[in-house]
Image (cartoon, helix red, strand yellow):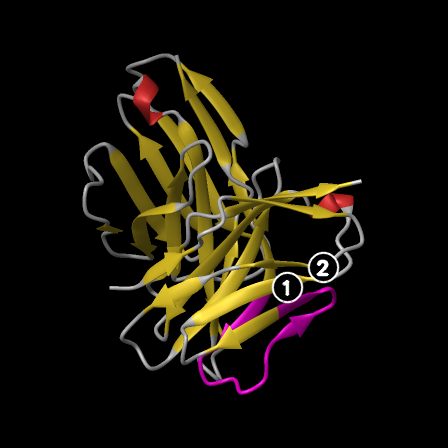
Amino acid sequence: AQKITQTQPGMFVQEKEAVTLDCTYDTSDQSYGLFWYKQPSSGEMIFLIYQGSYDEQNATEGRYSLNFQKARKSANLVISASQLGDSAMYFCAMRDNYGQNFVFGPGTRLSVLP
Amino acid sequence: GAVVSQHPSWVICKSGTSVKIECRSLDFQATTMFWYRQFPKQSLMLMATSNEGSKATYEQGVEKDKFLINHASLTLSTLTVTSAHPEDSSFYICSALTQDPISSYNEQFFGPGTRLTVL
């Protein structure tokens, strides 16, 4: 069975600084996908970044980058130059190769301080 | 990205009534849709997988007779909470799976969610 662990229930970061949100995963699949989503107070799930298990380079999307360490089974999200609008819940998720099994971590609440 | 809508965005109902939530893929066809439930300050939990033209697959612990799922077309799945009770109050989120016919790569797009409050 797949499992996602996010050990930081809450994080604070000063505006304009970088922050790393931790995510570790457990799976017996060889092929899988890792995702990060942002959920503001409105509730919508906003896709941030994706990393495939066979991707050799870490994924980047604007201010978001994913620090993928396959051997350690970790997929940490790095947000550079934090903005006040980044304050939200952040979920790490994993999907198997068939796309039929999507598992979310418990989430990390990020608060950006002015 | 692809757009998924949900209706209604919020609903308040009396205990014992049934509530229907619609999930639509607006610009693509989705043979597979997912229904999630999210309690306050918790993560999303998959309730069921909805496949067009067939019965939904429910996760362990989810009552199929209480949470009726119908995926009648390639763009619409509905979740009906029957005989709702206060403990059913939650945020319900659907997602739809796209699939590239050439590469078979698939992606999941989420609806904006429906907040259900049962009095």
Q: Is residue B32 visible?
A: yes
Question: Which residue is identified by label 1?
Answer: A78
Q: Position of residue A9 (x, y in %)?
A: 49, 44
For the residues marked 1 and 2, what is the alpha-carbon distance in whole angstroms?
7 Å
Classify A36 as above or below B5. Answer: below
Mark 1 and mark 2 in contact? Answer it, CB < 8 Å: yes
Secondary structure state at the residue bearing disc 2 = loop
Residue A61 numbered mark, or none = none
Compare residues B94 and A31 and report the one nearer the observer: A31
User: Residue A36 appears in which quarter of the rendering?
Assistant: bottom right
Q: Is residue B107 visible?
A: no
Q: Position of residue A45 (x, y in %)?
A: 56, 49
Q: Residue at x 39, y 62 (%)?
A: B31
Classify A99 as above or below B42. Answer: below
Q: Residue at x 31, y 54 (%)?
A: B49
Classify A46 as above or below B107. Answer: above
Residue A18 numbered mark, or none = 2
Secondary structure state at the residue bearing disc 1 = strand
